[in-house]
Structure formats: C-alpha cells, structure tokens
Image: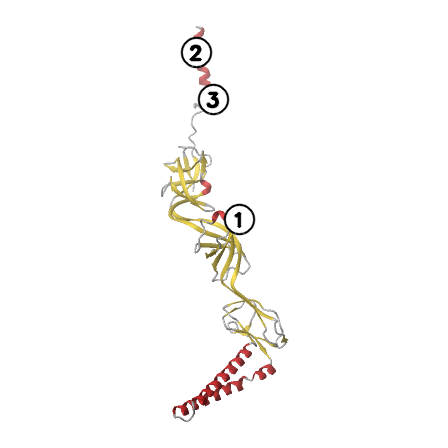
Amino acid sequence: MKQYHILIASSLLVIIALTSCGGRPQNAPNNIATPVSVVELKKGSISKLINTTGTVQPTYGVSLNAEMNGFYKLQTNPKTGKPFKMGDRVNKGTLIIQLEDREYENGIAIDAKQLSLEIAEQEQSKQKALYEKGGVTMSEMRNTEVKVTNARYDYENAQLSLEKMKVKAPFDGVIVDLPHYTNDIRVEQGKTMVSLMAYDKMYMDINLPESSIRYIKEAQPVYITHYTIPGDTLKGKISELSPAISSETRTFKGKVLVDNTQLKLRPGMFAKADIVVDRADSSIIIPKDVILSNRRRKYVYIVEKNTAKIRNLETGLEDEYNIEIVSGLNVNDNLVVKGFETLKEDAKVKIQK
C-alpha cells in the first residue's frame, strides 16, 4: 500500500513538471527558424596578388636653361591663345620662349651666309657644265665643291647659333615649372627657363620580399591605385627585375611601367602596386569572411529546403577579400553569408533578403 502511494506521488510530480513547461520537456529541440541571408553562387575570376608600394616617376623630364643671353619673350600657346603657363601640354618642337639680342643676331649674319651658299652652288653648277665640255680641269671643278661645302657649314652653324635663342619642347609633355620673368627683361645664360615632364607613361621603382622571387616574372600585369583616385585602377606591367637580393633588407628591386594616358597619376605620387602572379577564371569565388574552421578543416553553410547544411571546402587562390573554392560547393548553391555564426547542421533557417 505504501508503495502504491509513492507511485501516485511520483506521477503527480511528473505531470506538474510537464504542465509548468507548457506540456514539452525542457530539453526538447527548438524548432524556431534562424534568420539568414544567402547568395546564389556563380562562377567568376580571381587573381593571386603580391602587394608593394612605390613612388611613380615620369618617363621623361628635363629642365631647359638659357643657352645665350637675351631679352625674354614668353610665347603664346596656340592651343589656348594665351601665354604658356604651368600645366599646359606641349608638343615636341613647340617654341615656348624666344630670347632676342639684335647685336648677337647681326653678328651671326645668317642672311649673308645663306647668300654665300647660293652663290657657291651656282658657281659649282657652271664649273660642272664647263668641265663636261672640257673648259675647266678636274681640280678647278673640285675647288668649287669645297667652296659649296664650306658655305653650307657656315650657313648651318649660323642656324644652330640662332636656335640657341629659342627654348623649344624636346618631347611631347607638360610644363611643370615656369619661372617668372617679365617680358623684355634681359636674362643671363644658364638661367632655368622651363621644366617639362612626359608622364602619360610612368615608371615605379619597387622593392619585393625575397620570398616572392619565384612568383614574380617580367611582363606580369600590375594594378596601380592611389588614395586620391580610389575609383580608378590603372594598368601596368613588370618591365625589369634585379636577380640580386639585398643582404641588408632581404629584398630585390624591380621596375613597373604604368599606363597613365589620362594623366590621373602625377609625378611623385606614392602608389600601391598589386602584381598579378596567378589567375583563375570560371571558378566559384566566395568571401573569405564566411568561412569557418575547426580541427584543420574549412567549411561553410548552405541552405537546402530551408535547412542549414555544412559543406567542407578545399580552397585555391585568394586575394584580400575573396577566395577560390576548388571543391565543396557547386554553382547555384545558396551560400549563407549572414547569420552563419550560430548555425548548426540541419538547423531550420528562414531566408531574409
């Protein structure tokens, strides 16, 4: 009888406990769906990059000095109709500054030298005609050739002397410095007149870690960025590589040529260079920050029929943000990109947009 009362009491306690839990054991599975965000996987491309930095420099740069004394005459830019100024683009051979000195020009006497050349050439023609008729000797005819040659040298030297009074662009470029001189003021020989740079093509000296020497090759593509142009990536390529490793820095030198056609980079800018050492096309690419790891395995969650499923991964190339999936995922899989931190295998999920 006593055992009967004990059994009834125990049964009552179980019923009370179940009632207090809403009729469900405390350790029963929670069927509430976890909200997650997913992306449907597609194929893309990814590059393995080696990063470095450096200062970009123009391919051509020159400061032109006055070769002679003279009175300063800043010329008009035919493209703008205004006097040349810093920032103007000029073509090779464009006259930027003219120096004038009437006494110097008269001393050259270029008109007289040109006339002497014409007279010598006319005399040479006459002597040739007479020689063909036997009217003069070979020696007499050759003497006229000497006179023509000397007259031509005199005239060409006079032209060169006058050219020293002109400051012309030696290549297509941009005026980066134009010291101010008042027009008609006399400037002395050796004074800086103008500085030009050509930077539609630029170069960047770089230093690379010893560990990357087996990856870096000439002609590899390079992406160039600068913080002032965050929306633009310029293209370049490795043009030179040193085979020597510095014993002090454990780095080796290289040079990158940069295509700067639109002049977005300026000489002296500090830029970032991402060297493409490998590339995978038509691969599944996912963000690196959705990958979980446990006991030397990498895995992610995908959603199948509103249920979370684990997929173990084998990865390949990676860049700063993304990674290539060699195996473990398929095209059109729904990859969980938000809410995966607390998921468990076979947990119910609710996809949110």
Number of numbered discs present? 3
Instruction: Judge by depth and name the residue closer to the eye, 119 or 76.
Output: 119
Q: Which mark is residue 265?
A: none
Q: Which mark is residue 250?
A: 1
Q: Is residue 230 above or below residue 25?
A: below
Q: Quick one: label 1 or label 3, which is nearer the N terminus?
A: 3
In x, y percent, where is residue 69? 61, 76
State the SS at label 2.
helix
The Cα–Cα distance between marks 2 and 3, rounded to whole angstroms, is 20 Å
In x, y percent, where is residue 102? 60, 82
The Cα–Cα distance between marks 2 and 1, rounded to whole angstroms, is 82 Å
State the SS at label 3.
helix
The residue lying at 45 percent from left, 9 percent from top is 5
The Cα–Cα distance between marks 1 and 3, rounded to whole angstroms, is 71 Å
Disc nearest the viewer among 2 and 1: 1
Instruction: Tell me which corner region of the image, top left, top right, bottom left or bottom right, holds residue 96.
Output: bottom right
Q: Residues within 10 Å of mark 1 (few under 14, many from 20)?
A: few
Instruction: Tell me which corner region of the image, top left, top right, bottom left or bottom right, holds residue 322.
Output: top left
State the SS at label 1.
loop
The residue lying at 59 percent from left, 83 percent from top is 107
Q: Residues at badges 2 and 1 in contact (C-beta under 8 Å)?
A: no
Instruction: Judge by depth and name the residue closer to the eye, 40 or 235.
Output: 235
Disc nearest the viewer among 2 and 3: 2
Residue of label 3: 20
Q: Is residue 110 above or below residue 237?
A: below
Q: Residues within 10 Å of mark 3 (few under 14, many from 20)?
A: few
Q: Quick one: label 2 or label 3, which is nearer the N terminus?
A: 2
